[in-house]
């Protein structure tokens, strides 16, 4: 189905009174610290500070969108914009986009990011027909960036000062190039921070234009309590107009942005209604995966009582179901023998296609990825099967009580990977 890009109200102001967007708050964590953000509240990039959001799981987010569509809301765009950064929470973000694309093939999909972590996901975003991406870029000079960002975290280690700003800028530039190479519409958001980057916006706009960005959105700083810029003055309308005039020499300027909440819903000018708040509350109280229809759960176990086996070693899995609130064994399924490489795991995915999850005491990264790609939730844990099943069927998240294992550490393999 061909998507109608003209229905995005942020990119086409002519339809802002006709079509709306919903932001799905599935991304709570962030990988940088902007000087204007206090994440006790929402992401300032795309939201009004001081307004808290529910956080939804991908399954709850789909449930919420289904309800919104059924209620007749004129939603044409599903976006992910926080409350942290979508790509500091890539699993939740990508799973949500996959679910929405599958169930609502005519929805426009949109993400808004600081650009640090989006790079590895751009090809899949394009494959999912995510048509609009926003990167918040406050400076193209790391000296200025260092005044905006307190830290930037890659892996576990936070970088500070110039080093942090340089890394973020480098990632943003790589992401901009890749986004445009995939033909995705790119918007650049810039927070106008008086005395920090207000003299620099023309440089940002000119650079963004040279990288093929399509639209520029200058957003006035909203000083938020508890942040580095809490005592700054909010830019006046005259300052904002002047900044847009200057940057407008290089890039088309967005002038109708509403600085929406991370769970905004409806027409841009419409505040969040009680009806919407009720629907999001309902979704937040639903099981983690309310739409799950697959009846079974597979367990790698040696003795049938504990989740106790590494999948690489398992010759079979025990399959369970729940009927009238009672879990019970269904059968034991034989798995393909070791040695088939990726095909072995693809075959396991197909043998378990009616299972919503597999519980194992250990598993390598490759089978994890292949099984997840087959739509099967992989839970690494140790403990009683009965208790684990109750939680899985209640739609609860199981936090692994054991640390991840290195290959070869908890199985009889040679450390050469599960194959
Ligand atoms: S990217 Fe968004 S959530 Fe992260 S610190 Fe900046 S404004 Fe806050
Ligand atoms: S914050 Fe601005 S760009 Fe984002 S959805 Fe709202 S109006 Fe559109």
Image: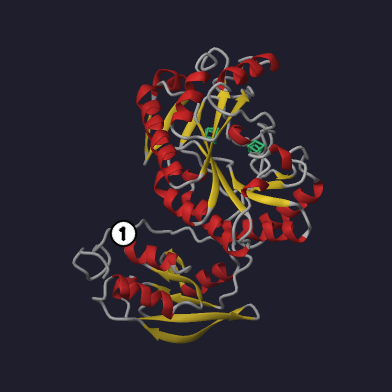
Asked whether 305 or 366 is in front, the reply is 366
Asked whether 361 or 355 is in front, the reply is 355
Residue 379: x and y, percent?
A: 44, 65
Query: Which residue ends up furthest to the right in the rendered image?
Result: 274
Report whether 306 appears left or right of 3: left
Quadrant hosting residue 225: top right
Residue 241: x and y, percent?
A: 66, 18
Residue at (65% x, 39% y) in the render: 10
Image quarter in which the C terminus is found: bottom left
Query: Which residue ends up furthest to the bottom in the rendered image?
Result: 331
Residue at (46% x, 19% y) in the render: 147
Asked whether 88 or 176 is in front, the reply is 176
Residue 260: x and y, percent?
A: 67, 37
Image height check: is 354 above or below 131? below
Residue at (38% x, 64% y) in the render: 368
What residue would you read off at disc 1? 405
- Quadrant holding ligand 2? top right
Report whether 268 appears left or right of 154: right
Asked whether 176 or 279 is in front, the reply is 176
Quadrant hosting residue 340: bottom left
Describe the element under mark 1 as helix, strand or loop: loop
Residue at (55% x, 16% y) in the render: 198
Determine if residue 24 is in view.
no
Image height check: is 339 above or below 177? below
């Amino acid at each position: 189905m061909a998507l109608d890009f003209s229905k995005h109200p942020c990119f086409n102001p002519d339809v802002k009174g006709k079509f709306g967007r919903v932001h799905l708050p599935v991304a709570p964590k962030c990988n940088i610290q902007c000087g204007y953000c206090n994440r006790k509240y929402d992401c300032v990039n795309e939201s009004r500070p001081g307004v808290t959001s529910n956080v939804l799981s991908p399954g709850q987010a789909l449930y919420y969108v289904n309800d919104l569509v059924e209620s007749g809301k004129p939603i044409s765009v599903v976006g992910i914009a926080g409350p942290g950064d979508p790509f500091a929470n890539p699993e939740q973000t990508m799973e949500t986009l996959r679910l929405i694309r599958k169930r609502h093939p005519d929805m426009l999909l949109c993400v808004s990011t600081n650009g640090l972590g989006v790079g590895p996901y751009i090809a899949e975003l394009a494959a999912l027909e995510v048509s609009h991406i926003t990167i918040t870029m406050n400076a193209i000079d790391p000296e200025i960036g260092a005044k905006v960002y307190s830290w930037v975290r890659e892996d576990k280690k936070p970088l500070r000062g110039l080093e942090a700003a340089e890394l973020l800028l480098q990632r943003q530039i790589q992401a901009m190039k890749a986004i445009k190479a995939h033909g995705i519409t790119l918007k650049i958001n810039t927070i106008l921070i008086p005395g920090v980057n207000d003299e620099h916006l023309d440089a940002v706009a000119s650079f963004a234009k040279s990288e093929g960005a399509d639209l520029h959105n200058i957003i006035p700083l909203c000083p938020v309590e508890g942040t580095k810029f809490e005592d700054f003055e909010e830019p006046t309308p005259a300052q904002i107009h002047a900044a847009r005039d200057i940057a407008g020499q290089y890039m088309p300027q967005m002038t109708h942005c509403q600085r929406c909440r991370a769970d905004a819903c409806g027409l841009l000018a419409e505040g969040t209604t009680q009806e919407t708040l009720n629907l999001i509350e309902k979704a937040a109280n639903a099981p983690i995966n309310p739409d799950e229809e697959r009846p079974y759960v597979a367990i790698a176990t040696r003795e049938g009582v504990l989740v106790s086996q590494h999948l690489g070693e398992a010759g079979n899995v025990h399959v369970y179901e729940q009927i009238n609130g009672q879990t019970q064994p269904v059968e034991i399924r034989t798995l393909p023998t070791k040695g088939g490489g990726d095909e072995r795991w693809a075959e396991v995915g197909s043998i378990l296609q009616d299972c919503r999850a597999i519980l194992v005491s250990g598993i390598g990264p490759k089978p994890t990825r292949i099984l997840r790609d087959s739509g099967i939730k992989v839970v690494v844990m140790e403990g009683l099967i009965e208790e684990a099943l109750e939680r899985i069927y209640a739609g609860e998240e199981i936090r692994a009580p054991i640390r991840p294992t290195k290959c070869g550490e908890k199985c009889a393999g040679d450390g050469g990977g599960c194959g």
